């Protein structure tokens, strides 16, 4: 039986930190679903279609990574997919507080779900999508934070500041 996990998030945009968590996950799981959330809790720079396209491009050569979308509760998505493992990346103590709450809520909603926490490598530990977007908006170098495909998406989206959201 294959071990399959879901790595949920907004990925606005995907960073080397996210990619590192996926790669680490694949050392313990056979397949990873990257589940891109469409829940409008955040003010996204990229549409869900753009986020999915970027992620698919990043993992185009990895048959063990499936990119999908979801809205609503993550536990409902897991139930539909018959998956019981959630992958989450942790960077800082502040992440832990939020993630700890989510584990307890998800466990209450479905006691069969397990959550695995992975920390990205030290060189990616401090990276967040928000920081990458901020640097890009200020015309700073981002190639050390995101793959080339994501860098191109950011350049196109922010060109002239016309489409950028604050």
Image (spheres, rainbow, N blue to C red):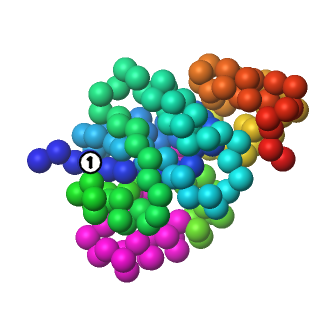
User: Residue 153's x, y, as percent?
Assistant: 66, 26
Can residue 114 be seen here? The reply is no
10 up-or-down from 23: above or below: below
Q: Is residue 89 left or right of residue 107?
A: right
Residue drawn at point x = 29 percent, y = 75 percent: 111
Quarter of the rendering containing residue 65: top left
Extreme residue toward the bottom, this view: 108
Which range is magenta? 99-122
Can residue 5 be seen here? The reply is yes
Badge 1 is on which residue?
Answer: 4
Residue drawn at point x = 22 percent, y = 48 percent: 3
User: Residue 136's x, y, as percent?
Assistant: 79, 31
Local packing at callout 1 (Cα closer than 10 Å; few below 14, some 14-19, many 20+) is: many
69 up-or-down from 13: above or below: below
Q: Nearer the viewer, residue 42 or 130?
A: 42
Does the segment drawn in magenta span residue 102?
Answer: yes
Q: Nearer the viewer, residue 126 or 44?
A: 44
Q: Nearer the viewer, residue 145 or 34?
A: 34
Does the segment drawn in magenta span residue 76?
Answer: no
Quarter of the rendering containing residue 76: bottom left
Q: Is residue 93 left or right of residue 54?
A: right
User: Residue 117's x, y, as percent?
Assistant: 44, 56
Q: Disc count in the image?
A: 1
User: Residue 57's x, y, as percent?
Assistant: 48, 24
Residue drawn at point x = 67 percent, y = 20 percent: 152
Residue drawn at point x = 17 percent, y = 45 percent: 2
Q: Nearer the viewer, residue 71 or 27?
A: 71
Q: Secondary structure at mark 1?
A: strand
């Amino acid at each position: 039986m294959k071990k399959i996990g879901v790595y949920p998030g907004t990925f606005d945009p995907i960073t080397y930190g996210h990619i590192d968590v996926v790669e680490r996950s694949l050392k313990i799981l056979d397949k990873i679903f990257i589940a891109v959330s469409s829940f409008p809790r955040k003010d996204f720079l990229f549409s869900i279609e753009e986020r999915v396209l970027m992620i698919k491009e990043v993992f185009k050569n990895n048959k063990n990574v499936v990119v999908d979308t979801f809205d609503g509760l993550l536990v409902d998505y897991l139930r539909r997919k018959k998956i019981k493992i959630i992958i989450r990346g942790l960077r800082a103590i502040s992440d832990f507080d939020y993630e700890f709450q989510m584990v307890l809520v998800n466990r209450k909603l479905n006691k069969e779900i397990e959550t695995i926490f992975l920390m990205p490598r030290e060189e990616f530990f401090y990276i967040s999508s928000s920081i990458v977007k901020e640097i890009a908006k200020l015309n700073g170098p981002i190639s050390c934070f995101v793959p080339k495909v994501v860098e191109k998406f950011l350049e196109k989206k922010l060109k002239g500041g016309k489409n950028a959201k604050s």
